[in-house]
């Protein structure tokens, strides 16, 4: 399993990812520098974002949760919609739920990042990166200790079936 650093990469997040035993996917040289500075071994960093890696993630998710339907919320990154990915998910009871372009606010994880910024970063003046990283890690531990599964996924939502995009804005 890997953490996609484009979602939120700071030194504390890279360290936490490594401590949790996850691989770290990076997409830029800047993200690579942050990961190395955080002490993530180079062997635990992957610089790939292709459909084959994404399919591997889906297979790992299915192996981890073998029963029932899985819903995976995604942005419109092209490897997510690759024909082989769609064919495999159709045969393995996984629904890919694509967010509309500029619709990141619909993704529940985005609210988690907003809360992290609000409770651990906004209005602060940490004396060191270590102090800031400790605050982020403390927030994540506190949040994870109180987390509950998300339910009521809105199965009849038109966002889940929306596949036609207007050719121009009104």
Image (cartoon, rainbow, N blue to C red):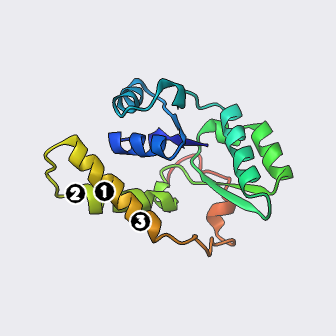
Left or right? Give the position of 107 relative to 112: right
Location of the N terminus by quadrant is top right
Q: What residue lies at 50% left-to-right and 51% top-to-bottom?
A: 169
Disc 3, disc 1: CB below 8 Å? no
Report helix, strand or loop for mark 1: helix
The tag earlier along the polypeptide, 3 or 1, is 1
Would you name the residue on which mark 2 appears? 122
Numbered-mark total: 3
Would you name the residue on which mark 1 appears? 117
Quick check: can you spot residue 26?
A: yes
Disc 2, disc 1: CB below 8 Å? yes
Q: CA distance from mark 3 to mark 1?
A: 13 Å
Q: Residues within 10 Å of mark 1 (few under 14, many from 20)?
A: some
> Depth check: 148 or 108 in front?
148
> Depth check: 8 or 106 in front?
8
Q: Residues within 10 Å of mark 2 (few under 14, many from 20)?
A: few
Report helix, strand or loop for mark 2: loop
Task: Where is residue 57? Give x, y as percent.
Answer: 67, 43
Q: What residue lies at 42% left-to-right and 27% top-to-bottom?
A: 32
Vertical placement of residue 17 versus 151, above or below: above
Quick check: can you spot residue 8?
A: no
Disc sitting over residue 38 in the figure: none
Report helix, strand or loop for mark 3: helix
Would you name the residue on which mark 3 appears? 143
């Amino acid at each position: 399993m890997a953490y996609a650093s484009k979602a939120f990469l700071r030194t504390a997040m890279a360290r936490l990812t490594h401590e949790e035993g996850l691989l770290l996917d990076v997409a830029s040289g800047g993200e690579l520098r942050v990961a190395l500075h955080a002490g993530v071994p180079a062997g635990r960093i992957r610089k790939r974002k292709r459909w084959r890696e994404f399919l591997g993630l889906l297979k790992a998710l299915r192996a981890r949760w073998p029963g029932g339907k899985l819903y995976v919320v995604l942005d419109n990154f092209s490897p997510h919609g690759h024909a082989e990915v769609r064919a495999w998910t159709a045969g393995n009871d996984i629904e890919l739920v694509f967010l509309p372009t500029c619709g990141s606010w619909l993704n529940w994880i985005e609210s988690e990042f907003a809360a992290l910024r609000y409770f651990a970063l906004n209005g602060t003046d940490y004396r060191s990166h270590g102090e800031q990283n400790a605050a982020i890690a403390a927030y994540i531990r506190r949040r994870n200790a109180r987390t509950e599964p998300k339910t009521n996924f809105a199965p009849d939502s038109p966002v889940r079936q929306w596949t036609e995009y207007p050719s121009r804005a009104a």
